[in-house]
Image (cartoon, rainbow, N blue to C red):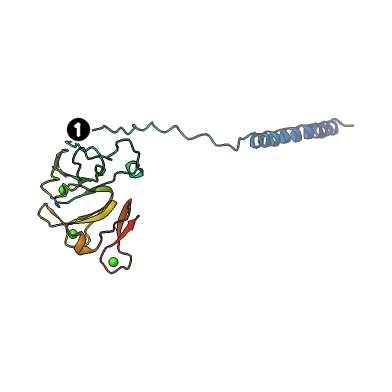
Amino acid sequence: MSARAAVAVTRGRGRRALLPGSLFLTGAAFLATGCGQATESPVKAPPATPAPRTPVVFTDITSAAGIAFTQNSGAFGKKYLPETMGSGLAFLDYDGDGHPDLFFVNAAEWPEKRRKKATQALYRNRGDGTFEDVTAKAGLAVEMYGIGVAAADYDNDGHTDLFINGLGPDRLFHNRGDGTFADVTQKAGVSDPAFGSSATWIDYDRDGRLDLFVCN
Ligand SMILES: [Ca+2]
Ligand SMILES: [Ca+2]
Ligand SMILES: [Ca+2]
């Protein structure tokens, strides 16, 4: 074997000798790549923790706002059912000044145990965070065993009216638009004497005039 031939053989052997190594490296690279893919977690990293929100806190400002209403169920030990059901209230802007006012439904003393006068209550929103009791001025110092109330402008005159139901005849009060209400129950034909619990105004026939749905 000549020296040139010996070199060629050596190179050839060298190439052959390198082949397994090359495959190994390639395979190692593949395995490394494959291992990288296999070990990649399908679970994504959790999102960053959101900043804690400021907790919503409510403060009882009833007294500070000038609201002194206390519901009177008339209870005196007999534990009558209606005593457990009242009463409702409604936000309405009865005087149209843009500030929602508060109307409280009140129950009453039982005929067999009359101890005090308890009436409905209307509080006018002064717009500065306080309310004034305008019940008597508005003509709503009415005694009845009220439970539910539905406020709406049933006659489309721009002033919100009040319907109250409960134990005994229901009552409808029309808002005159001057800060007072008129009892129009009889004229309107809505003096249902049944035991009512709530009501709502809906225009069920879509004629543009609100209709009254009463729950007894
Ligand atoms: Ca108002
Ligand atoms: Ca009205
Ligand atoms: Ca209607």
Residue 155 visible here? no
- Decide which of 65, 9 is in the foreground and name it: 65
- Give the quadrant of residue 154: bottom left
Residue beneath the point at 28% across and 52% down: 168
Q: Does the residue labelled 1 lie within 8 Å of ligand 1?
A: no
Q: In this view, does 24 lie to the left or right of 173?
A: right
- Residue 68: x %, y % from top left: 19, 36
Crowding at mark 1 (Cα within 10 Å: few <14, some 14-19, many 20+): few
- Give the quadrant of residue 108: top left
Compared with 186, 62 (above or below) is: above
Tell me which image quadrant ligand 3 sits in.
bottom left
- Give the quadrant of residue 131: top left
Q: What residue type is labelled 1?
A: Ser
- Decide which of 104, 75 is in the foreground and name it: 75
Q: In which quarter of the image is the C terminus?
A: bottom left
- Residue 137: x %, y % from top left: 10, 47
Residue beneath the point at 29% across and 56% down: 193
- Decide which of 63, 12 is in the foreground and name it: 63
Residue beneath the point at 73% across and 35% down: 27
Which residue is label 1 attached to?
Answer: 63
Please give the count of numbered marks on the rendered protein.
1
Residue 99 visible here? yes
Q: Is residue 27 left or right of residue 13?
A: left
Q: Quadrant of the N terminus?
A: top right
- Residue 198: x %, y % from top left: 32, 52
Q: Which residue in the rendered view is the most extreme toward the front? A: 112
- Residue 39: x %, y % from top left: 65, 33
Give the structural element (helix, strand or loop) at label 1: loop
Compared with 164, 80 (above or below) is: above
